[in-house]
Amino acid sequence: MGGCLSSPYAAKAGAGAPDGGAVPNSRFEQAKATRRPSEKRRNRLESQLIEAVKDHCANPTVKLKTMNSILMKFARIEPAFMELRELFKEFDTNGDGALQASEIEACLPKLGVEVTDELLNDIFKMSDIDDSRELDFHEFVIIIALIVLLNMRTKEATARDEDEVSEIDAAMNIVADAFAFFDKDADGSISRDEVEAALSEGGQKGGGSHHNLAAQRFKEMDWDGDSTVTFREFLISFTDWVTDAEEE
């Protein structure tokens, strides 16, 4: 992947802890303590995503066997991510590098999605992983993954924009395949042991350097420091990996 593969969210998860542990994230803790009225609906939507990811992990589009096999997919992923960046910029009407709920509402029809205000609210909150009430590009990709993995597009939109849709869908399915590479037990989340096991499959077995690499990669992905990596957290790191590859 070249370079450090660090996430802009890593500091929030306590990447600077000298013992490698997580530093309490006051913003995240505050977000957890402040539950909103849509919480049950939001949890149902998250449950649907978890089940979709688990199904994909059990039956991946392509079974990736090494980190290199993931890297080799980047050439196919990059055009879709570039297209998503252009879409993000198009709807970032005030040019502040973030999308507000009103901008997402304007964007969804172009993605072929018809949703109620209630569902829009839940999708936005589920993608707003740091509870900032606005979405950066990483969080925008979470919305795209939700749309693809939960089949939210209308049939008419899918038929009309078949080529564009298939490119983005293919990219999101590759991301899900990459998640499946790490999620060995297909339970919808990634543990540190699974990261170490996955990296071992690349031929780097044993030794302190391998253990340290696994710890570093896991810390990059574990945004909230709870010792598990969800698909949403994985998407943030994966977006960084693709960005690093684009810039090299």
Image: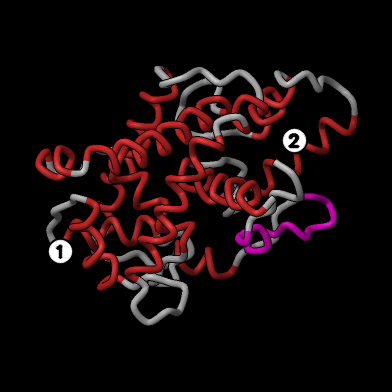
Q: Which residues are magenta?
A: 8-20
**Local secondary structure at mark 2:** helix
Counting the numbered discs, the total is 2
Q: Which residue is mark 1?
A: 117
| Image position of 29 with respect to 191: above or below | below
Which of pointers 2 and 1 lies earlier in the amino acid sequence?
Answer: 1
The reply to whether residue 48 is visible in this rendering is: no
Residue type, label 2: Ala
Locate residue 205, reporting x and y percent. 82, 20
Q: Which residue is mark 2?
A: 214
Which quadrant: the N terminus? top right
**Local secondary structure at mark 1:** helix
| Image position of 116 with respect to 76: above or below | below
Judged left or right of residue 166, residue 115 is: left
Judged left or right of residue 213, residue 152 is: left
Q: Residue at x 45, y 33 (%)?
A: 176
Residue 18: quarter of image = bottom right
Locate residue 76, reporting x and y percent. 49, 35
Binning the other alpha carbons within 10 Å of mark 1 as few (below 14), some (14 to 19) or many (20 upward) gives: few
Residue type, label 1: Asp
Q: Residue at x 64, y 27 (%)?
A: 194
Judged left or right of residue 24, residue 213 is: right
| Image position of 42 with respect to 74: above or below | below
Binning the other alpha carbons within 10 Å of mark 2 as few (below 14), some (14 to 19) or many (20 upward) gives: many
Locate residue 74, reporting x and y percent. 56, 37
Q: CA distance from mark 2 to mark 1?
A: 41 Å
Determine if the magenta segment contains residue 53. no
